[in-house]
Image: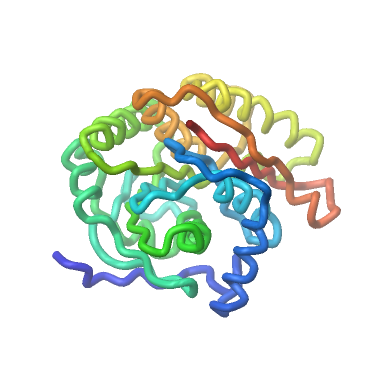
């Protein structure tokens, strides 16, 4: 099928600068963190406007050695498309440069987990993968990736997605990193958000996807990307992950100064 489909930026000039020079200057400033990049099975990185969460995302990407191939999983904020929507070919255009979809890896994932549906419509207006790409490109110019948008809350599907990813990645010779694009609790006070978020973070650090699902659903934690995080954790554990590190946590109130209604952001690396 080639790379005929071009997915154009949906939030350039809104979530991050549209000007390439300004964008990369901002990204590099966020990556200016004292860290030793090392290989990782996966990570959790936020996807809000860079002014609010860029410093948390930058801390994540400063701590990981980004391989040539990545899977980027995100929640489906728009409600458009299939419950598990993948793109298996094409190019994503960004002001920082174009990123090619890894067709071979994407096709292998579909074959391993046929619930995945080829669906570019689910990705057309979705911001949560797009905002990760400038960071990934800053760390790896020859990046190829697979975009997956998750719009299901069914644990068995999230777990199944994780198992399928692990099976595919373990059969490959190349290292692939999985990125779960997620913000944490939304639109409650800063104190409430911090308490809720750290209950969820505790389960991620324990590599406990079932525990994360229980906390999010039972404690009403409005973590938009818990589905991608569960899939990533499930895969990472099966592939031998033994630890997770919270490299940075913040809320939007840390930037805006308004603590009455905030969004939480966690940067976590799984190894």
Residue at horizontal 36%, vertical 30%?
235
Establish if 192 lies above or below 12: above
Render colour scheme: rainbow
Expressed as whole percent of the image width and height from the top left, the position of residue 22 reads 62, 76
Q: Nearer the viewer, residue 31 or 163?
A: 31
Quarter where residue 228 is shown: top left
Which of the two residues, 54 or 195, is positioned nearer the viewer here?
A: 54
Q: Residue at x 54, y 72 (%)?
A: 12
The total number of labels drawn is: 0
Closer to the camera in the image, 47 or 263: 47
Name the residue rendered at 79%, 40% in the picture.
190
Instruction: Decide if residue 152 is on the left or right side of residue 213.
Output: left
Residue 74 location in percent, x, y? Answer: 45, 47
Q: Residue furthest left?
A: 1
Q: Position of residue 202 (x, y in %)?
A: 62, 24
Asked whether, in this view, residue 3 is left or right of residue 238, the answer is left
Which sits in the foreground, 34 or 130? Answer: 34
Give residue 140's position: percent from left, percent from top.
43, 59
Extreme residue in the front direction: 36
Q: Is residue 28 above or below residue 79?
A: below
Q: Residue at x 77, y 47 (%)?
A: 261
Residue 145 is drawn in which quadrant? bottom left
- Quarter of the figure that contains the N terminus: bottom left
């Amino acid at each position: 099928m080639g790379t005929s489909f071009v997915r154009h930026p949906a939030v350039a000039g809104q979530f991050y600068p549209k000007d390439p020079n300004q964008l990369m200057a901002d990204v590099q400033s966020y990556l200016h963190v004292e860290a030793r990049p090392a290989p990782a099975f996966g990570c959790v990185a936020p996807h809000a406007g860079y002014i609010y969460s860029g410093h948390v995302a930058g801390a994540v990407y400063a701590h990981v050695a980004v391989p040539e191939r990545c899977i980027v999983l995100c929640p489906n904020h728009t409600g458009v498309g299939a419950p598990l929507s993948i793109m298996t070919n094409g190019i994503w255009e960004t002001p920082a440069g174009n990123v090619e979809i890894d067709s071979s890896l994407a096709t292998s994932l579909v074959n391993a987990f046929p619930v995945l549906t080829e669906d570019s419509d689910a990705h057309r207006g979705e911001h949560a993968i797009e905002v990760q790409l400038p960071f990934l490109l800053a760390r790896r110019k020859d990046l190829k990736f697979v975009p997956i948008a998750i719009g299901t809350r069914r644990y068995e599907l999230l777990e199944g997605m994780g198992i399928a990813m692990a099976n595919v990645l373990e059969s490959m010779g190349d290292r692939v990193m999985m990125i779960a694009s997620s913000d944490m609790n939304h639109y409650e006070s800063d104190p409430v958000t911090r308490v809720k978020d750290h209950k969820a973070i505790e389960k991620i650090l324990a590599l406990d996807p079932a525990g994360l699902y229980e906390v999010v659903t039972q404690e009403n934690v409005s973590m938009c990307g818990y589905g991608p995080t569960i899939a990533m954790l499930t895969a990472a554990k099966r592939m031998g992950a033994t630890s997770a590190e919270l490299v940075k946590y913040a809320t939007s109130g840390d930037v805006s100064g308004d603590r009455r209604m905030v969004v939480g952001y966690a940067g976590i690396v799984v190894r």
